[in-house]
Image (tube, grey):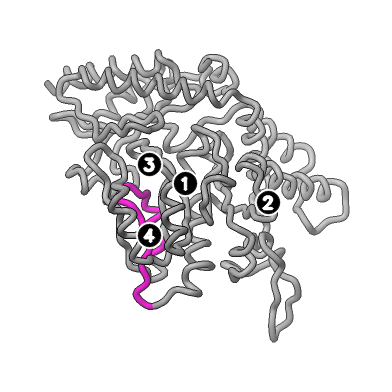
Amino acid sequence: MSEAVRAQFPIFARTSRGEPLVYLDSGATTQKPQVVIDAEMAFYEGWNANIHRGVYEFSERATLAYDGTRDTVAQFLGGVRADEIVFTTGTTGSINLVAQSFLRPQMAPGATVLVTEMEHHANIVPWQLVGATLKAIPVTDAGELDLAAASRMLAEGPALLAVTHVSNTLGTINPIAQLAAVARAHGVPVLVDGAQAVGHFPVDLTSLGADFYCFSGHKLFGPTGVGVLWARQALLSEMPPFQGGGDMIDRVTFAKSTFAPAPQRFEAGTPNIAGVIGLDAAIRWVMSEDRVAWQAHDEQLLHLGREMLAKLPGVSMMASPEHAVGVLTFTMTGAHPHDIASILDSRGICIRAGHHCTQPLHARFGVQSTARASFGPYTTEADVLALGRGLHAVREIFA
């Protein structure tokens, strides 16, 4: 299955350091299929124009493509309303928008945002910037959320629950519907960081129960610099603009400005038109693929990888959650993660080393940094085995 998917990605015809490319850093960014590259190229080469401003052919075509992507995203997320889709710069931009436009205007002094110990910094820092106090749901030794603690903490009535759907460091798939049901019972709105989820399995927002959901195009085989915020229309309609400028206004005078309805009021200025067009191509491509087979393949590679690492002397997994996507995060006795990554790089193997923007999670597990291999639907069994051989070579160097 992965070979058929892989064949659609031109980068895998290339080498790295003179070796066959083994790309195991999809958690940082995914590679792009030819259809996405072609979509952006076609726009720039054939009908590049700004949107919403021109009555000429190219502008009208760009406008239709840009606005039509909302329908594609709405379908992708389980059939939500297209007017609930806001285009942003990515997950980080989406979370900052919610922090500034939703939380800040109605936040009481000393308000608490409930996060988890496994959150990416993008789901921590924006809440701090608006003055919220953070409390974190604990993570167990297995790398899963302490759901009993989550229930107790939600009962305390935080201003918001902000939780990742899938941990970028552990691969943990969190039970969002269960958490959202508890939050709803206590009147707590829910934001979900879906950056690591959408590229691995279907997301149906009509059943999750969240109030906000966000993701990035580049984690979904699409372009960088573009992302999505979905929010319930009832919330969007009450939120003030985050940024001011062209295309988000109704009427402007020197005395006062009025604003366009949501979602347009949150898209000030000329947007990343080519990025949105590329995102549309990426989502259409994903929806055309067998995602059930993707999940099964991902689970097989994760099982293979965990078994392989368990047999390597001195290698320790950070955690092994039961429900997870294809992420292997580990340390090796005597070898710094950056040295591991550097040696693997010499063999054409691309992994991530560092704290993966999850410093609080690393502190919880008592380590400063780790090595991380993360899979995509184009990852093969041969890639995972190449990682194992590379780690044997690292072990020999540092033995």
Residue 177 tag number: 1
> Residue 54, which numbered label?
none
Q: Earlier in the sequence, mark 3 or mark 2?
A: 2
Per the image, the residue denoted by label 4 is 125
Relative placement, left or right, of 109 versus 279 is left
Residues at badges 1 and 3 in contact (C-beta under 8 Å)? Answer: no
Q: Earlier in the sequence, mark 1 or mark 3?
A: 3
Instruction: Give the side of residue 109 with respect to residue 45, left or right.
Output: left
In which quadrant will I find the C terminus? Answer: top left
Kind of residue at disc 3: Ser
Q: Marks 1 and 4, Cα distance to the nearest angstrom?
A: 25 Å
At a point 70% along the width and 76% down the height, the residue shown is 258
At horizontal 65% and vertical 27% (from top left) the residue drawn is 288
Q: CA distance from mark 3 to mark 2?
A: 27 Å
Say if 119 sits above or below 25 in the image: below
| Pair 1/3: label in front | 1
Q: Which element is circle 2 on?
A: loop
Using a 10 Å C-alpha cutoff, classify the residue at mark 2 as few (fewer than 14 neighbours), some (14 to 19) or many (20 or more): some
Please tell me in which quadrant of the rendered image residue 172 appears. top left
Percent x, y for residue 264? 69, 61
> Under tag 4, what secondary structure?
helix
* Kind of residue at badge 1: Ala
Image: 235 above or below 38: below
* 255 or 148, nearer to the observer: 148
Between disc 4 and disc 3, whose residue precedes?
Answer: 4
Inter-mark Cα distance, 4 to 3: 17 Å
Precedes in sequence: disc 1 or disc 4: 4
Report the disc number at residue 81.
2
The structure residue drawn at horizontal position 57% and vertical position 22%, both measured from the top left corner, is 10
Q: Which residues are magenta?
A: 109-127
Q: Nearer the viewer, mark 3 or mark 2?
A: 2
